[in-house]
Image (cartoon, grey):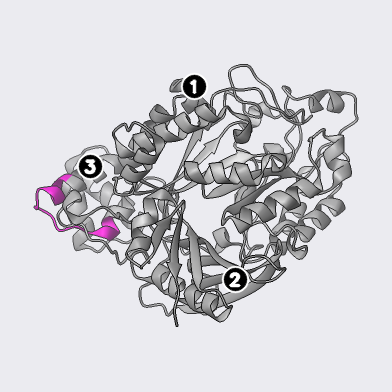
């Protein structure tokens, strides 16, 4: 294995094809089986740690298994809450004993949760070990809490659950959640973003304050549809106005807002679904930052199954759904990220319809300018010139300013910042930075003494740690001053507070703040 690693370094191996060729050549020479990338990665780290090999970020990245998991600049960890009653009676939603409402026990995240008896600490530790074993840096974590309606769970359970997630990342327990959060600011595994799933009708000012105390920075809203007749038909329990109100409250508080949308609901047709997605981004009452497109899946465990049996519901055909998703992707503006297309439900659990197409995103390429489709990922070129772009749009009674560093033709997105400015309507003028994110291969942020001796804070394979975020913050501060606002706030994940402190921000309640001067 050492021979393979040294050959890769000496031959400047840069691609998966180079790695495969060297592995086959060495295996043939020594008449041995080809080693796995995981075993090669372990050998690489051992050689670097023993100072018998100079670190090579390019070779290290080659050995990472499923590199896409950390090519967005962070790693995601999903943690499932325990089964608990749900306030909703949605006809499409499955109910299965031993799983939270809307989840099935053969979904990957649910299987991991069951294996760990729904303990948040054990779920996080298991994912951290799996990610590290396959070579992914786990310094920057976006924690996603899933399972049922979060806001309906008992408050003491919520606090315990989130604290245990922080404890797992801190590798030590703390007596209360505030101490666990403080510890996480300098921990090895820092939670830089925390999202929850809830319903629009559960979002209030009081609920938002509580979410901030827990450290949440993003809310996934189960919107499903923006048409009241459709929401009434599926027994959703809320209407269009609740979604509009929740979106404004969350954005004014700095949250990133993700809509879970469900085309192919009972009573829908492809023309109406296309119209619905167009309105999401032409009507300032909506304008979500992120989308999850979950075509209605027909499951035996849901009441909708009986509708289908009685011929009261007919799913779209494969061709109808593909054409619809293509049209949706074309209508999505460049300041929106399509997080997912289709739920992670095993196809054998889906009775009928195109929701069985688990690889729908891969089937539809070249039709989208969303953030995810333009992220630089592993295609970073340090010599490529970057340009600052600005896009303004009205949303929920305020001005959203979307700043990015991209290449000249805007095909590669390196870094972004979302700034919300509200100075009218008689309310208190404010400027709120809702997101700062640099893409590319995630890099370690730990202090030098805590890392391998030869590892660096920057890498020729990633745009991270090169000052892009700092430049975007400076631009946002200028824009805020020109808008007549002399104080700027940032909704900050607990694990990234230290970064903002270095740039002159101070913690005020749950936000990082800074007074601006010309």
Residue 239: where, in percent of width, then height?
81, 43
Q: Which mark is residue 42?
A: 3
Q: Is the N terminus in the top left, top right, bottom left or bottom right quadrant?
A: top left
Mark 1 or mark 3, earlier in chain: 3
Q: Secondary structure at mark 2?
A: strand
> Splitting the image into 4 quarters, where does residue 286 fall?
bottom right
- 387 vs 255, left or right, is left
Residue for point 17% across, 42% down: 30
Q: Position of residue 395 (x, y in %)?
A: 70, 64
Q: Which residue is mark 2?
A: 401
Left or right of residue 104: residue 182? left
Q: Residues within 10 Å of mark 3 (few under 14, many from 20)?
A: some
Rendered location of residue 434, percent (x, y)? 54, 60
- The reply to whether callout 1 and callout 3 are in contact (CB within 8 Å) is no
Tell me which segment is drawn in magenta: 46-59
Please state, as top left, top right, bottom left or bottom right, where the C terminus lies in the image: bottom left
Neighbour tally class for label 1: few under 14, some 14-19, many 20 plus, Cα within 10 Å: some
Determine which residue is flagged by label 1.
114
From the image, state whether disc 3 or disc 2 is nearer to you: 2
Label 1 vs label 2, nearer the camera: 2
Disc 1, SS: helix
Question: Residue 51 magenta-drawn?
Answer: yes
Q: 258 left or right of 473?
A: right
On the image, the x and y values in percent for residue 261 come to 71, 46
Bin the neighbour count of mark 2 within 10 Å (Cα to Cα): few under 14, some 14-19, many 20 and up.
many
* Front residue of 430 and 396: 430
N-terminal-most mark, 1 or 2: 1
CA gap, disc 1 to disc 2?
42 Å
């Amino acid at each position: 294995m050492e021979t393979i690693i040294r050959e890769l370094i000496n031959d400047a191996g840069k691609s998966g094809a180079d790695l495969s060729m060297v592995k086959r050549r060495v295996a043939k020479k020594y008449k041995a089986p080809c080693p796995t990338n995981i075993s090669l990665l372990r050998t690489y780290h051992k050689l670097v740690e023993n100072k018998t090999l100079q670190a090579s970020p390019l070779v290290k990245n080659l050995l990472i298994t499923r590199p896409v998991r950390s090519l967005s600049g962070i790693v995601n960890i999903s943690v499932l809450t325990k089964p608990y009653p749900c306030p909703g009676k949605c006809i499409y939603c499955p109910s299965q004993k031993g799983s939270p409402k809307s989840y099935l026990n053969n979904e990957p995240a649910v299987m991991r949760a069951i294996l760990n008896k729904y303990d948040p600490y054990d779920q996080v530790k298991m994912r951290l070990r799996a990610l590290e074993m396959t070579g992914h840096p786990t310094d920057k974590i976006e924690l996603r809490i899933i399972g049922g309606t979060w806001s309906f769970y008992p408050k003491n359970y919520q606090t315990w659950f989130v604290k245990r997630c922080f404890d797992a990342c801190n590798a030590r327990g703390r007596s209360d959640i505030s101490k666990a959060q403080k510890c996480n600011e300098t921990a090895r595994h820092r939670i830089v973003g925390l999202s929850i799933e809830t319903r629009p009708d559960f979002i209030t000012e009081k609920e938002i304050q509580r979410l901030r105390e827990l450290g949440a920075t993003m809310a996934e809203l189960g919107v499903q549809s923006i048409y009241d007749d459709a929401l009434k038909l599926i027994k959703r329990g809320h209407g269009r106005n609740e979604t509009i109100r929740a979106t404004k409250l969350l954005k004014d508080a700095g949250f990133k807002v993700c809509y879970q949308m469900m085309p192919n609901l009972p009573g829908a047709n492809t023309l109406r679904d296309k119209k619905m997605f167009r309105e999401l981004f032409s009507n300032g009452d909506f304008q979500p930052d992120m989308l999850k497109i979950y075509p209605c899946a027909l499951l035996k465990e849901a009441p909708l199954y009986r509708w289908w049996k009685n011929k009261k519901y007919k799913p779209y055909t494969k061709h109808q759904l593909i054409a619809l998703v293509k049209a949706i992707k074309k209508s999505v503006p460049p300041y929106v990220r399509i997080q997912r297309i289709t739920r992670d439900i095993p196809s054998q659990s889906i009775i009928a319809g195109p929701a069985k197409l688990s690889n729908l995103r891969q089937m539809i390429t070249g039709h989208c300018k969303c953030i995810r489709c333009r992220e630089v990922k592993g295609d970073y070129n340090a010599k490529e010139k970057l340009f600052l772009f600005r896009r303004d749009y009205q949303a929920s009674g305020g001005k959203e300013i979307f700043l990015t560093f991209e290449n000249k033709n805007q095909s590669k997105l390196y870094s972004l910042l979302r700034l919300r400015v509200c100075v009218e309507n008689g309310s208190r003028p404010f400027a709120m930075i809702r997101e700062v994110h640099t893409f590319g291969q995630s890099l370690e942020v730990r202090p030098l003494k805590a890392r391998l001796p030869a590892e660096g804070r920057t890498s020729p394979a990633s745009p991270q740690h090169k000052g892009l975020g700092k430049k975007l913050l400076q631009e946002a501060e200028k824009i805020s001053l020109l808008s007549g606002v002399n104080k700027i706030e940032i909704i900050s994940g607990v694990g990234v507070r230290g970064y903002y402190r270095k740039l002159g921000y101070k913690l005020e309640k749950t936000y990082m703040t800074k007074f601006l001067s010309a």
